[in-house]
Amino acid sequence: MLSSYFDKHSIRVAAQELSFSEAVAEATGLLVSAGQAKPEYIGEVLANLEALGPYFVVAPGVAIAHAPPSAATIKPGMALLKLAVPCESGSANDPVALVFALCSPDSESHLDLLASFAEKLSDSQVMNSLLNASAESVISAILFENQL
């Protein structure tokens, strides 16, 4: 279940305007704060962004920031940074308002996490609710109380 990958403190709403790389770093930092990744994982994700561009902007308004499994990951995890001011990533799916971050220590858990994410968040009603949510409590209710 997707909600099992989130820590209770891994959801945040950013009121200030951020660049895409700042938003990616902040979302990934939530994984570090939750004890799911080491601080160097932020650098790995940003290096991935620099090398490959905004490939992880997967749908209109939605990014899934991640890097390949590595020693910088402690356990599988997800975080979400909701941007009150959507940002430009350079993708056809701009502007980005939801920056999910994920980490996993191995390929199997990485694929399991991505599959769980894709299955649950392919629901347009859930995505619209997340895109329109403006408070962490509302986002948590969407993610946890609906057992995503």
Image: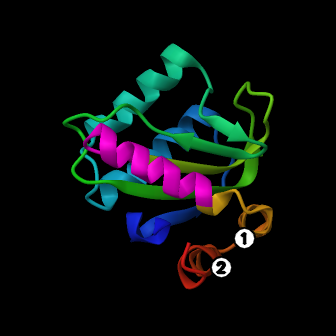
Is residue 93 visible in the rendered image? The answer is yes
**In magenta segment, residue 110:** yes
Label 1 neighbour load within 10 Å: few <14, some 14-19, many 20+? some
**Residue at 74% of width from left, 27% of height from top?**
91
Q: Quadrant of residue 127?
A: bottom right
Mark 2 near mark 1, Cβ–Cβ under 8 Å?
Answer: yes
Query: Dominant secondary structure of the magenta stretch?
Result: helix
* Type of amino acid under label 1: Ser
5 or 45, nearer to the observer: 5
Residue 138, numbered label: 2
Q: Residue furthest top?
A: 51
Look at the numbered disc 2 and give the secondary structure of its residue. Answer: helix
Q: Quadrant of residue 121?
A: bottom right
**Residue at 41% of width from left, 51% of height from top?**
112
The Cα atoms of the two marked residues, 2 and 1, are separated by: 7 Å
Quadrant location of the C terminus?
bottom right
Of marks 2 and 1, the one in the foreground: 2
Is residue 15 visible in the rendered image? The answer is no
The magenta segment is 103-119
Query: In the image, 56: left or right of 7?
Result: right
Look at the numbered disc 1 and give the secondary structure of its residue. Answer: loop
Q: Residue furthest bottom?
A: 145
**Vertical comparison of 42 with 16: above or below:** above
Q: Position of residue 114 (x, y in %)?
A: 49, 48
Q: Position of residue 75 (x, y in %)?
A: 25, 54
**Residue at 62% of width from left, 73% of height from top?**
139
Q: Which residue is mark 1?
A: 134
Q: Position of residue 77 (x, y in %)?
A: 37, 56
* Type of amino acid under label 2: Val
Query: In the image, 9: left or right of 125?
Result: left
Label 2 neighbour load within 10 Å: few <14, some 14-19, many 20+? some
**Vertical comparison of 83 with 46: above or below:** below
